[in-house]
Amino acid sequence: MAIIEVYDLVKVFNGSIRAVDGVTFNVEEGEVFGFLGPNGAGKTTTVKILVTLLKPTSGVAKVAGYDVVRNPNDVRRSIGVVFQNPALDDRLTGRENLDYHARMYGISGSERKKRIEEVLELVGLTEYGDTLVRNYSGGMKRRLEIARGLMHKPRVLFLDEPTLGLDAQTRRAIWDYIKELNKEGVTIFLTTHYMEEADYLCDRVAIIDHGKILIIDNPNKLKSSIGRDIIYLECSDPRRFVEVLDGEQWIENISLKNNLIMIGVKAGERRIPKLVELAYENGVEISSISMKKPTLEDVFIYFTGRKIRDIEEPRPSMRRFPR
């Protein structure tokens, strides 16, 4: 059953800038759904519409069965949100921050006290509940923000870059907390710049760029779709060599980005000699060649033509897409 339904969503700014351009997708109840895109892709605008901070220009968006335009208060009662920028009061303790948030949601005194202890235990902060937040580490603050987002028992938790700026060990600990939350039945809607985070956590991911959804699928299926092995090749005449390779049936997909050829194949180690042979026959000089198994980062590059942090690079020419 879909807990988030989005159909033909459009958001136009200044009369002509289509930040979100006909986006359609569903999020199933109980899944961890990743929403990936470079800055300016429409990712943040879509999320702001879903959490009722922006109204769409057209289209339909529902969360927990409630229309985000017609029933914004019902949507807000059904969701928790952890924003990228910290929103804690560092002059209060952890418990006091949670208590204030619970009062905002009208949670009664006895239930409020019980719930505070539950969420502190869930994120491993019980012994630091009476510590001023200004004395928390970055990881502890993120865990407290997640706890705050869970105070009113939301059906959907929106996490906007939940581990941005944290060290690798703390990121991994946050991932484990997110998985535990999901096991308890909370649907997670996650935006992230970390491809390994999306790969580890998400049941499905959507890639958005230029306001449009490019593809949605399970991370493993996405990686398989661009070939079982990825060969990266640099040469003297990349555009002409791509035209030569485009006729080879054993190549599953191929793209060209900033003179770097990206080739998806099976049994890549056996294909490298053939690539060298084809280059020699066509008067093309190979300057470098390497191979690796595809990652979600490779998928992102394949469909958007850039790494998720490379926001100023031009889009590549694409010769063939996965069928």
Image: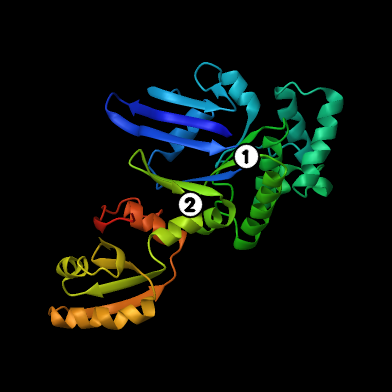
The image quadrant of residue 8 is top left
- 285 shown above or below 173: below
* Secondary structure type for disc 2: loop
- 81 shown above or below 249: above
Q: Position of residue 147 (x, y in %)?
A: 71, 40
- Asked if residue 101 lies left or right of residue 241, the reply is right
Q: Nearer the viewer, mark 1 or mark 2?
A: 1
* Secondary structure type for disc 1: strand
Q: Which mark is residue 17?
A: none
Q: Residue at x 59, y 24 (%)?
A: 75
- Asked if residue 117 lies left or right of residue 287, the reply is right
**Residue annotated with mark 1:** 187
Around disc 2, counting alpha carbons within 10 Å, would you say few (fewer than 14), some (14 to 19), or many (20 or more)? many
Q: Viewer-proximal residue, 159 or 318?
A: 318
Q: Residue at x 21, y 69 (%)?
A: 245
The image quadrant where one finds the N terminus is top right
Among numbered discs 1 and 2, the one appearing first in the sequence = 1
Q: Residue at x 64, y 62 (%)?
A: 169
Q: Position of residue 9 (x, y in %)?
A: 40, 29
Residue 215 visible from this viewpoint: yes
Around disc 1, counting alpha carbons within 10 Å, would you say few (fewer than 14), some (14 to 19), or many (20 or more)? many
